[in-house]
Image: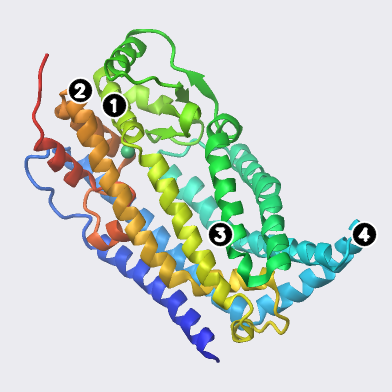
Amino acid sequence: MNTYCIIILAAVTGSWLLQTAAAVLGLGRTGTPLPAGTGLDMEPARRERMQRYVASGMRLNIAEDTAGTAVFLVFWLCGGFGVADALSRSAGALLGGFAGGGPAVTGIMTGLVFFGLLGVLSSLAGLPFSLWRTFVHEERFGFNRTTPLTFVADRLKAGLLVAVMGGPLAAGVLWLLALYGPEAWLPVWLLVSVFSLLVSFLAPRYLLPLFNTFTPLPQGALRSAIDRYVTGQGYTLSGLFVVDGSRRSAKVNAYFTGLGRQRRIALFDTLLEKLDDDEVVAVVAHEVGHCTLGHIPVMLGLSVARTGLMLWLLSFFLTEPQLFAAFGVQQVSYHAGLVFFSLLFTPVSLFTGVGFHALLRRNEYAADAFAARTTGRPDVLSSALRKLASENMTNLNPHPLQVALHYTHPPLVQRLQALGALPVRRG
Ligand SMILES: [Zn+2]
């Protein structure tokens, strides 16, 4: 038991405790009456069903966090990392020999096997919960539309994408580390940043269509109304699509992706079923707000800065023998150092995550205000948000600790109150 061991043990259990405390506090609040004046008067039976869905989701989160933490601790304390390292070294030597490369190639192969092994293990540990969430929890409340075939295909596609895109990135990082040692943090940062920028450009056109079908919104009353709004704003939309969200879930959504000329707005087919044309325009206006206010590049910039901070800190600990000893690994290596450091980084990551979420929520208020101002109808956006929350059975009374830790959007009541304070301009 060295100092690193104690710090990481405290970080992992502390983080579990915090998540569990937030969920338990949240469970105690599901039945709290809603404030008046938000227009959230729904039938008691509907409200009760929403509360049961929300509570069931929270209990599932508690179970998943607890099991995940327990599996990690057992793996760690039973020497799993040492075994994984030894296995990867044998496999890496074998693969490196096949590739006919020197020690550098063998080192990279070893690292890739190590990452792959841990990745597969952690995804297997989460699989039962993923299955339960889709086919029991969501199914029970009538949301699930994912077939077992789609579930398996999604998993395979996601795994393949990680291998095809993450593999070369990891190899590049290991290669830079082998070349420059801990001082590699700067070139590694550059590489990772260019990679994430590239993914942001490629995702809307090449990655997301692997999972969903995007069809341009057909001409008609809705399309004309949206075009009128968008042109009125002097904005050009690079793409307005209907996405087949109904393939996986009955939930309703809309989002904005991409950078530069690749930016596009995607409306779920389920959203078009539930909202009237004015409400859809209000939702589009909210998404245009995100774009006009530059939210995507700013958040991307911040996440690049966060990666830089992490990599700079990493350079101090990467080859610290005590850190390896804490995980029962004798031989110091860059691949294991990366994994161990990311665990040591847990508290910093929790802290920056809270700040990140707060900024995301601030952006949501700003996009709401933009939509309200440019359409002149905050009441229409409010009505769209109420429908979204009701259709998706959103938690209407989250605990502030849950909001701080996990919420990328402000709770509905606060959004409605903010919109309610804005002027309505009719006609
Ligand atoms: Zn938004």
Quarter that holds the N terminus: bottom right
Q: Nearer the viewer, mark 3 or mark 1?
A: 1
Image height of 410 relative to 226, above or below: below
Q: Amino acid at mark 4?
A: Gly
Measuring 60% from the left and 32% from the top, which residue is drawn there? 206
The disc placed on residue 13 is none
Contact (CB < 8 A) between labels 2 and 4?
A: no
Q: Amino acid at mark 2?
A: Thr
Q: What residue does disc 2 label?
A: 375
Name the secondary structure under disc 1.
helix
Q: Amino acid at mark 1?
A: Ala
Contact (CB < 8 A) between labels 2 and 1?
A: yes
Where is residue 334? Give x, y as percent: 68, 71
Q: CA distance from mark 2 to mark 4?
A: 64 Å
Query: Closer to the N terminus: mark 3 or mark 1?
Result: 3
Where is residue 101? Give x, y as percent: 89, 61
Residue at disc 1, CB closer than 8 Å to ligand 1: no
Q: Residue furthest bottom?
A: 1
Q: CA distance from mark 2 to mark 3?
A: 44 Å
**Residue 281: quarter of image:** top left
Q: What residue does disc 3 label?
A: 126
Contact (CB < 8 A) between labels 3 and 1?
A: no
Tell me if mark 1 has few (under 14), some (14-19) or many (20+) residues whose alpha carbon lies within 10 angstroms of its own.
Answer: many
Q: Nearer the viewer, mark 2 or mark 4?
A: 4
The disc placed on residue 100 is 4
Q: Quadrant of ligand 1?
A: top left
